[in-house]
Image (cartoon, rainbow, N blue to C red):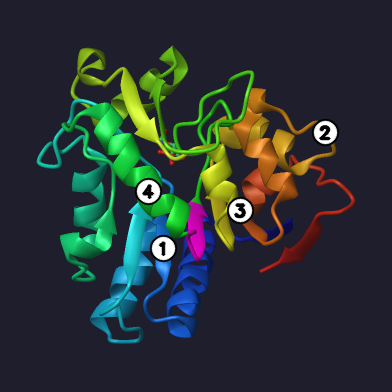
């Protein structure tokens, strides 16, 4: 694991975007594993800017998303498809045929089968990641086990509360989601991970400090990844004492 300490969230996002763009420069039909939430928004802003300025060619890029709420259609502003179209897919002109994201309105079992068939045969070239307040990655909530492939999950109250800011009321926050398993995330060839804000401190301590790899904090499994770069701004990083095997650099 590599930790890069930056001056600010914006710098973390800019550097994360550059790593994502480098993957496309190396492989024009790269499969990008994408994430949602507030944290990646500026990463997508910098990627979209590079596409607009023709600094990188998105003409053959493929994408796969980590997760989607069950019960929301892609037209719903709370859905992750809507989010992805707004922040990255439309600005970079990536058409639906090159986009894999669970359909929140489809039959769940059929959707899991469709996503797994694709994901089993196509490990992502890079996975962009952030973390939930309880250490979840994708929607892999604290559990007794690490799930391997795409599966349906019941969202914890904590996750629903923390994601409720993106909905007009708590009742509108879906209770279930489809998510890539932690195993699928680990099969990405490279991981670009960023986090910011005090509420992520507990999870980031468990991920970066010396301690157990536990499904109770799903992000801790990243300790086992061969190529995982974590960007944290100084304000968050200063409270963390990375384990001896973490390579630490300042941006
Ligand atoms: C959701 C997503 C996660 C994301 C998390 C944190 O729960 N499923 O992939 O990491 O939100 O979001 P934010 O960046 O808004 O804190």
Q: Quadrant of ligand 1?
A: top left
- The relative height of residue 62 versus residue 235 in the rendered view (above or below) is below
Residues drawn in magenta: 123-128
Question: Where does label 4 land, which residue?
Answer: 117
Query: Mark 1 to mark 2: distance in Å?
Result: 30 Å
Left or right: residue 145 versus residue 26 is right
User: Which callout, 4 or 3, points at the residue further toward the start of the chain?
Assistant: 4
Report x, y in % for residue 130: 51, 45
Q: Secondary structure at mark 4?
A: helix
From the viewer's side, name the closer residue of 78 and 154: 154
**Element assignment for label 2:** loop
**Do labels 3 and 1 touch, CB within 8 Å?**
no
Q: Residue at x 86, y 53 (%)?
A: 245
- Residue, far left: 75
Q: Where is residue 224 drawn, in percent x and y?
A: 74, 48
Going by the picture, which residue comes out furthest to the bottom? 54
Distance Cα–Cα, label 1 vs label 4 = 17 Å
Does residue 195 show up? no
Disc nearer the start of the sequence (3/2): 2
Residue 250 visible to the viewer: yes
State yes or no: discs 1 and 4 in contact (Cβ < 8 Å). Answer: no
Q: Pointer 1: what residue? A: 32
The reply to whether dot 1 and dot 2 touch (C-beta < 8 Å) is no
Among all residues in the image, which is located at the extreme right? 244
Direction from residue 117 to residue 123 in the image, left or right: right
- Marks 3/2: CA–CA distance: 22 Å
Residue located 62% across and 52% down the image: 232
Mark 1 or mark 2: whose residue is earlier in sequence: 1
Determine whether the beta carbon of the residue marked 3 sits less than 8 angstroms from the nearest atom of ligand 1. no
């Amino acid at each position: 694991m590599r930790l890069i300490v930056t001056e600010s969230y914006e710098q973390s996002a800019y550097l994360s975007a550059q790593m994502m763009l480098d993957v496309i420069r190396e492989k024009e039909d790269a499969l990008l594993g994408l994430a949602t939430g507030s944290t990646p928004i500026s990463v997508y802003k910098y990627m979209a800017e590079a596409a607009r300025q023709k600094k990188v060619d998105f003409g053959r890029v493929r994408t796969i998303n980590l997760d989607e709420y069950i019960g929301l259609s892609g037209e719903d502003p709370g859905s992750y498809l809507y989010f992805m179209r707004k922040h990255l897919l439309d600005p970079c002109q990536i058409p639906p045929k090159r986009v894999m994201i669970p359909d929140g309105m489809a039959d769940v079992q059929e959707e899991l089968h469709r996503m797994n068939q694709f994901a089993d045969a196509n490990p992502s070239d890079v996975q962009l990641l952030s973390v939930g307040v309880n250490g979840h990655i994708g929607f892999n909530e604290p559990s007794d086990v690490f799930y391997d492939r795409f599966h349906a999950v019941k969202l914890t109250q904590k996750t629903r509360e923390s994601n409720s800011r993106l909905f007009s009321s708590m009742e509108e926050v879906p209770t279930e989601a489809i998510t890539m398993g932690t195993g699928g995330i680990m099969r990405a060839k490279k991981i670009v991970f960023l986090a910011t804000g005090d509420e992520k401190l507990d999870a980031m301590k468990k991920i970066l400090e010396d301690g157990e790899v536990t499904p109770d904090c799903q992000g801790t499994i990243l300790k086992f990844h061969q190529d995982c770069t974590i960007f944290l701004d100084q304000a968050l990083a200063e409270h963390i004492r990375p384990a001896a095997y973490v390579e630490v650099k300042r941006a």
